[in-house]
Amino acid sequence: MEKQYPQSSVVFRNVGQRYFPQTRVECHYSVTSTHQWSSSDWIGIFKVGWSSLSEYHTYAWSLVPEGYAEGSAVDCCALFQAFYLPRPNPVEYQFVYVDKMGKVCAQSRPFTFCAPKPLDELETLSEERNEEEGGGYDDKEELLLVVPRAQLLQSELDKCLREKAELQQAVQEAKREIEEERRSNIKAKVEWESERDALKEELDQLCQNLTHKCDVLKKVEGENKDVKSSEENLSSELSQLTVEQAHIQQQMKDLEDEVKVLTDREKETKVEMERQEEMLMKLSAQIKNVEEKRKLLQAEHETSQAEVRGLQTRLEASERSAEGLRGELRELGTRHGHTHAELHQSRLQVAQLGLQLSEEKLLLREERANWALEREAFRSAAQADHQKIEDLRIKVQRAEERLLEKEKMPFWRENDSDSKQTDSGKKQVKQAVDRHLADSVFSESANYIMW
């Protein structure tokens, strides 16, 4: 067995017990990964029991295969030529591996050099040879070869060593391929892990984006609910404004009825004045009864003045109520303007949300059409009132002309104070009619502004 040093970095392999000096000797050894190989390393054949490195019989340089990488394990072979080998003798020898520093790295087990025996170490080999002669047929002849057994064994050993070297080279190639495959697997694993991390980051980013979009969707739904609630509030306010408008229209109708009543009373007063004029014309023929009839007419005239003053008071009250209604109409117009602006802003916000509020838009269009119809109705009613007031104004002018004609009479000259009072009453009636006309025009303008 080979003598190995503790933690030996070189190991001798397949060392025989006997070698023949007539043939070359192959020394097989393995260099481990811990050995720092150098081209100055050498292997010597020493006698067993040597004491100095200079006592070697022969040596050979340590060689490594091509492509050797420092720090890797490799199998090597050193050749000793037959010319330098010791002669056959019973002395034991051994292989010794020495590095460049002169340090002994390994020693093999002992072996001897001996010569083969003449007969015992001979082998007989048969060989067939084909020869062609002129007779046109082949003769087969067996040849017997006698060779030393050592030479035969050496040839077989060489063959085995070549096969072993080929196998070792194949193993090295397989190891190299395995190492390359392992490196490629590691590289693929690293790439796969990096790709997995990238996909994981992308998945996290997608999750974050999904969460953000869910939050945005919830916020939009909340805003949609707020818009719906604001639409409901606007609808309620619109209905309330519609009720208030109906109430105002009812008040305007009541005022129109009162104006009609006042107009009828004015007509009655005119009829009464005409009747009194007729009575005065009849009484002018009767001079004796003028004073008594004048007193009676004066008393009736005072009664008429009291009635006119009552009518004036009622007209002033109607005017105050009309002023209050006009203020309410202005306030309603302002509120309707603000409501219209808020409604427009809500429409813009609702339009951004899409087709979800299409029904509300249709309702709003219907309400617009209703407003247009109501506006046309108000306008036609205002035109009718305007026409009625024009008719009343014409009638009042005619009555004034008649009164002016009657003022030319002597009786009316004597009663200038009464005629002035009558003129003031006419002016008051005319002012009331003008105010009613202005109120009608203002109501028409307010309806247009509300629209």
Image (cartoon, grey):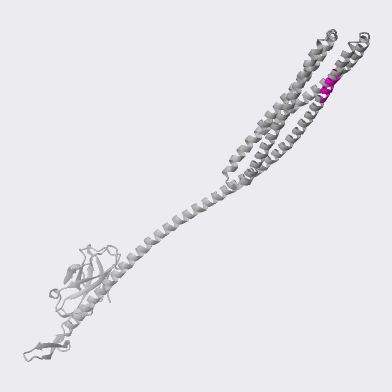
Q: Is residue 265 magenta?
A: yes
Horizontal and vertical percent for residue 442?
70, 27
Instruction: Give the quadrant of the C terminus.
Output: top right
The magenta region covers 264-273
The residue drawn where x is 62% and y is 43% is: 361
For this rendering, which residue is in front, 406 or 334?
Answer: 406
Q: Is residue 162 above or below residue 401?
A: below
The residue drawn where x is 75% and y is 24% is: 391
Q: Is residue 217 visible?
A: yes
Residue sticking out furthest to the front: 285
Horizontal and vertical percent for residue 111?
22, 78
Q: Is residue 326 visible?
A: no
Secondary structure predominantly adopted by residues drawn in magenta: helix
Position of residue 345 in the picture relative to residue 316 (left or right): left
The residue drawn where x is 16% and y is 76% is: 24
Instruction: Give the quadrant of the N terminus.
Output: bottom left
For this rendering, which residue is in front, 26 or 344?
Answer: 344
Residue sticking out furthest to the left: 134
Horizontal and vertical percent for residue 217?
57, 49
Where is residue 380, by image quadrant?
A: top right
Position of residue 349 in the picture relative to residue 3 (left or right): right
